[in-house]
Each structure stands twice: as C-alpha cells, then as structure tokens.
Amino acid sequence: MDILQTLREIYDSLTDAERRVADVILKDPRRVLECSISDLSRLANVKSEASVVKFYRKLNLSGFQQFKVLLAQDLSKAPMEIVYEDVSEKDDPKTITQKIFKATVKAILDTLDSLDIKSIEKATELFKKAQRVLFFGFAASAAVAFDGFHKFTRIGKNCLFSNDEHIMATILSNCTPNDLLVAVSHSGETKSMVALAKKAIGLGMPVVAVTGNRKSSLAKVSTVVLATNTRETRIRTDAMTSRIVQLVILDTIYTMLAASDPKAIESLNRSRLAVSELKY
C-alpha cells in the first residue's frame, strides 16, 4: 500500500481535523515516523488522539503502528533501508559491519545519557522485594525476556518466563501483589502485552516496562518505565539495536541486585557449579 499516494487521493474526502493530520504527514513524513499518536495530534493541532484514530481508519488501517510501518516502507528507496536505515545496497561487508557496530554503541551511549537513574533504582528495589519475577515478551522481545529470566534465576530469584499469551494469562491468574511483572516490548503498543500489564496492576502487582517508547500505551500503565533511546524507533516497531540496549538495562539491574546481596553471590556460585557439572 502506497500510503502517501493514497492519502493524496482521499484528501478531499477528509474532515477538517483529518486534513490537518494529513498536512503534517505530507509536509514532513519522516518526522512523523518519530511521533507517538499523541505527538501527531499535537502537531496537527487537533482536539485529541481520536482524530488521528479516525484518520488512519479512513485509510482502512487498524492501528497507528501499522500506519507508521507502511509509511516507512513507502519512504524507503530500497529494501535494505527497511532492514537498517543507514545501510545501502552499495555498502561492502566491512562498511555494513562498521555501521551496525557503531550504531549499537551509539544506542547504548544515547540511552545512558537519557536513562532515569531513579527509575533504575526503583526497578531494582522492586526486583529485590518480589517473591516471583515474571518475564514476558513476544518475538524479538522474548529473547530479552528469556535472558532476564536466565540471569535473575542464577542469583536465586524465583523467575518465570513466557512468550505465549495463553500461558501468560494463566500465570497471572495465580499471582499476588508480592510478584513482579517485567514486560518487554520495543514498541510498547502490543495490545496483549498492554492488557496483561493492566491485569497485573489490577491484581496489585508492580509492572516494570522495558520499552523503546516512554510515551507508549504500555509505559502509561506501568509502575516503572525503563526506556531505550535508539534511532530505529524512527522507522519501525521491530527491535534491532534496541534489543542490545534492553539487555544492558536488565544487566545493570542484575548487577546492582547481586552487588547488594551476599546471598545472591552465593546463589550465583552454586549455579555456576551446577552448570560446570554439565561440561567436559
């Protein structure tokens, strides 16, 4: 679907508010890729996010993230640009390797500059108090959630992991306010993850969101938000460098927790010994 062309074709049929949204997009579509739905409604000077919702529904789309993905594809001059913004089909292997590594390092440093240390401290305290820690994530985010499950289990935390919505719902049905949900979602707009977070909050459980969008629907319902700062959020909802940054964030909490608890070090030593018995 050619979003910009379709938008031009239906422009005359739009309401005044929808035209203001369309004008912002047509004037600077790349800027819109960086926007949340709230940002776009503000730039378009419309009364509420509902005007943006009505706008993308006029394009027969079901969600704002779907709109941004299609817009990103529309703006891409080559398929490679969808995979990674700064890489072109003319780049040789060495250049591609350098660009990916440098972008990842930059993402980590950018997140370090923007990360709220108080949020890290608060999240660490929630981990420390929790009787059980639930790590939930879908697709690429599931890899981050599983890594967290593995690490925190090694220092003696009672952890569970799932990337299946039905199993997640089942686990939550038996949770208490003494448990903690760690919800990993780069976009923060996955409907089922937001619904699970709301259910956890309803049970009195704290929720730590690890996300690339501090203004996302997931962030709005979470107790603590740990947001990455990566350029890829400009053009797509899937994670690339953000995945690495999310791992670093959880590593930081893991290290802070282990450093402050002698029992955690004892558990780590026991887990290392147990694993060593499985090796030659």
Image (spheres, helix red, strand yellow):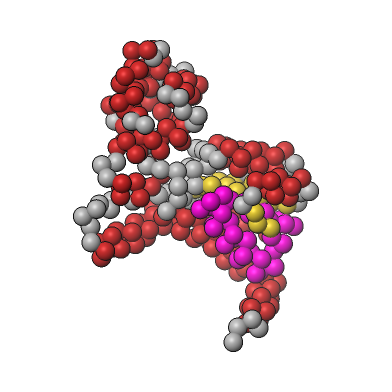
Q: Is residue 211 above or below residue 56?
A: below
Give the image location of residue 73, x and y in percent.
34, 39
Q: Quadrant of the N terminus?
A: top left
Q: Nearer the viewer, residue 270 or 74?
A: 74
The residue shown at (38%, 26%) is 43
Q: Is residue 171 above or below residue 72?
A: below
Give the image location of residue 183, x and y in percent.
60, 48
Give the image location of residue 268, x and y in percent.
65, 74
The residue shown at (61%, 52%) is 163
Give the image location of residue 219, x and y in percent.
55, 41
- The part of the chain drawn in magenta is 130-159
Q: Quadrant of the C terminus?
A: bottom right
Residue 253 highlighted magenta (yes or no): no
Asked whether the viewer can see residue 250, the reply is yes
Q: Name the residue at the left extreme.
A: 90
The residue shown at (45%, 50%) is 239
Q: Is residue 187 above or below residue 246?
A: above
In the visual, does 78 lie left or right of 69? left
- Picture quadrant of residue 265: bottom right
The residue shown at (53%, 42%) is 188
Q: Name the residue at the front extreme.
A: 1
In the visual, does 271 lie left or right of 88? right
